[in-house]
Amino acid sequence: MAKIISSEKGTKKEVIIQKAAQLFKSKSYTAASMRELAETLGVEAPSLYNHIGSKSELLQAICFKVGNQFTSQIDKIENSPASAIKKLEAIIRFHIQTMLENFDEVYVANHEWKHLQEPFLSDFLTIRRNYEKSLTDLIEIGIQKKELKNINPYVAVLTILSAVRGLEFWQRNKKNVSQQVLEDEMVSHLLTGIEN
Amino acid sequence: MAKIISSEKGTKKEVIIQKAAQLFKSKSYTAASMRELAETLGVEAPSLYNHIGSKSELLQAICFKVGNQFTSQIDKIENSPASAIKKLEAIIRFHIQTMLENFDEVYVANHEWKHLQEPFLSDFLTIRRNYEKSLTDLIEIGIQKKELKNINPYVAVLTILSAVRGLEFWQRNKKNVSQQVLEDEMVSHLLTGIEN
DNA sequence: CCTACCGATCGGTAGG
DNA sequence: CCTACCGATCGGTAGG
């Protein structure tokens, strides 16, 4: 009798995906059941299947939404006229902001992608590999232009991506650190370490 | 009829734990079944229970082994007579080395701890919180001694721990980066960014 | 160490 | 949107 509410946040399917992201984050994809998901939406489990095809489809939607978000952003930044170091800063800030604004979905894409089925698993890994390649290229350009130290680009990408990803451990409102301070200090920490 | 081999690596139980870490890493704790674990050991699933109490006991053993490893190391470094920055370097190097030598177990402790049952979940989080506190204190001392910039210690800890943790994405033997280069560059990247 | 088996839970379908 | 239900798989036990 209850109904899934298609709020201003989007269609019923989008509401289900959003709730799924929350649940997959807190319990992990495998441990989360469709019955639990249905309960948070106030319906019985079989009713979900009027809106979605399968549990794995939910994971796919989350992972590719996040993947495409980052890909389109790095494309935009790459084609802008800024210096390499400014581009890097923009990317780091985008990571931090997206992570904090879109926490559940980014968390799930980072942690649960390995439960994607083929061919989605391969597609997702390709998207991620391309993203890392773009970032590596950007750092290599910075080195050539002497904006950056003569570092190993691969290690630098690993360090930067890992550090921003670690924001999932950030306790909001705790430790009296505002998002602005967090962002500025992390950018400074990561860029001062490689700047020429 | 097959038997679990207690190799030079330890007792049968320790062999099971090691294989469990491998399996939990590649499939995640929830998705990995005891039947699969038994298969990698060449026995039937019920035979495992002659050596262990439960699946969750395996996760506990892995998480606390790793937790205690890091805790005892930071205690040792804290009490050594080096400068704050040298201590920080030692900790970062320990993280990198332990991550690479003990990959499966560190990975599982980092990713699957949330599936611990109480009271183990609370105990594990306490261990981790204490570890982060020790590291934060160390950075605060470095700031007081003017070895480090006037940064926010909490953000610095987050950045450092996240970056070293990201080594789980490092492709060994790939990209022509030796472990030594990786270690040196990451240490430099993370310390140059906060050094005075 | 094994075979045989249990109760619980899972994702998903049939049918209305 | 629901009730009723299916086959598969799970962690674990009994008993030898």
Image: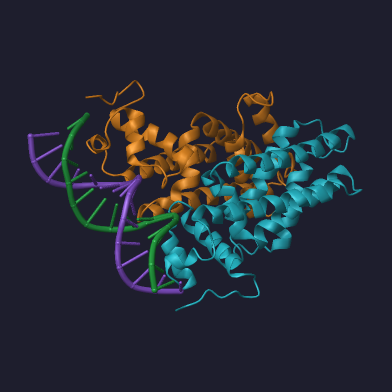
Chain colours: A orange, B cyan, C purple, D green
Q: Nearer the viewer, residue B179 or B138?
A: B138
Q: Quadrant of residue D11?
A: bottom left
Q: Is residue A176 above or below residue D14?
A: above
Q: Is residue B17 left or right of residue A114?
A: right
Q: Quadrant of the N terminus of chain A?
A: top left
Q: Nearer the viewer, residue A26 or C10?
A: C10
User: How many discs mark residues in the rendered view?
Assistant: 0
| B176 relative position to A72: left or right | right
Q: How far across and down, in percent of the image, does residue A113 sit?
A: 44, 48
Q: Residue at the bottom extreme?
A: B1
Which residue occupies 55% across, 34% down? A94
Quadrant into which the C terminus of chain A falls: top right
**What percent of the width, then of the height, locates residue A71?**
47, 42
Q: Is residue A69 visible?
A: yes
Q: Nearer the viewer, residue B94 or A165?
A: B94
**Viewer-proximal residue, A52 or C9?**
C9
Q: Which residue: 45% across, 51% down? A: B30
Q: Which residue is pictured at 41% across the width and 47% down the height?
A: A30
State whether residue A6 is above or below residue B50: above
Residue A144 in view of the camera: no
Where does the image place residue A117, in percent across and percent down from the top left? Answer: 36, 54
Q: Residue furthest top?
A: A8
Compared to residue A155, the image places residue A79 above or below, namely above
Residue occupying image coordinates x 62% and y 70%: B11
Q: Is A8 positioned to the left or the right of B155 in the image?
A: left
Residue found at the far right of this picture: B81
